[in-house]
Image (spheres, rainbow, N blue to C red):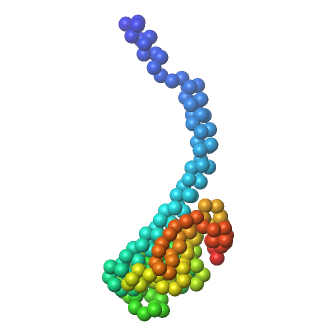
Amino acid sequence: MQGHQDSTRGRGFTLIEQIVTTAIVAVLACVAAPALGHLVARNRLQVAQSDIITALQQARALAVQTRHRVMLCPTRDGRQCTDDLHWETGWLTGHYHGDHTDQLDGSPALADGGHEQLNIVSTAGRRRIRFQPDGSAGGSNASFTICRPGETDGALAVTVTNAGRIRGAKATEAQAIRCAKNE
């Protein structure tokens, strides 16, 4: 009996051991928190860039598949296009008629709720992206810049060429500054 009691005594932790372990975990958490915050912020930028690329690809594919013009436009309410350079509150995709139509015909085919914790700014002259039935994006090249409000670090860009090609990249310094200033 005596041997059984001695063997079970050494299995627990003392209060001192638990306090030391908790202190070590707290120190490690304090060291890791800034890096984790940066990782989360970078991930938000990448997700937004990916979402814009996907929306543009889907709009282009819809135009080619249906042989009708398709427009991608910013929205604030999820129902109508806005005349804005800011896309962080979301965007709509759908068919339209005419070259200078500012609204979609009927309900949007696709909608995205946006990324309100970020700034997403399009090229000054391009408030809408219009894809023709051949997949081209009439007009001049357009770009989107994605950044954290007030910060240029890590800003990303998406470019749509006149031919309809879509490409993601790191934002230029000028794009990042314009985005951070929310212009």
Image quadrant where one finds the C terminus:
bottom right
The quarter holding residue 123 reads: bottom right
Observer-nearest residue: 33 or 72?
A: 72
Q: Is residue 183 left or right of residue 132?
A: right
x and y percent of residue 117 in the render?
55, 66
Name the residue rendered at 58%, 71% in the picture: 145
Front one among 18 and 106 = 106
Q: Position of residue 170 (x, y in %)?
A: 58, 64
Residue at the top extreme?
2
Q: Position of residue 158 (x, y in %)?
A: 53, 70
Quadrant of the snapshot with the N terminus: top left
Give the answer, above or below, for where 83 lies relative to 39: below
Count all numbered tags in the image, as a single digit. 0
Residue 101 as seen in the image, left or right of residue 117 = left
In percent of the image, x 44 and y 81: which residue is there?
Answer: 136
Can the viewer see residue 147 in this picture? no
| Viewer-closest of 71 and 11 | 71
- In this view, the residue farthest toward the front is 163
Q: Quadrant of residue 64?
A: bottom left
Q: Is residue 163 visible?
A: yes
| Residue that appears at 48% across and 72% down | 166
Q: Is residue 114 left or right of residue 123?
A: left
Task: Please tell me whether residue 9 is drawn above or below residue 107 in the rendered image.
Answer: above
Against 89, residue 39 (above or below) is above
Front residue of this view, candidates 167 and 18: 167
Q: Position of residue 174 (x, y in %)?
A: 67, 71
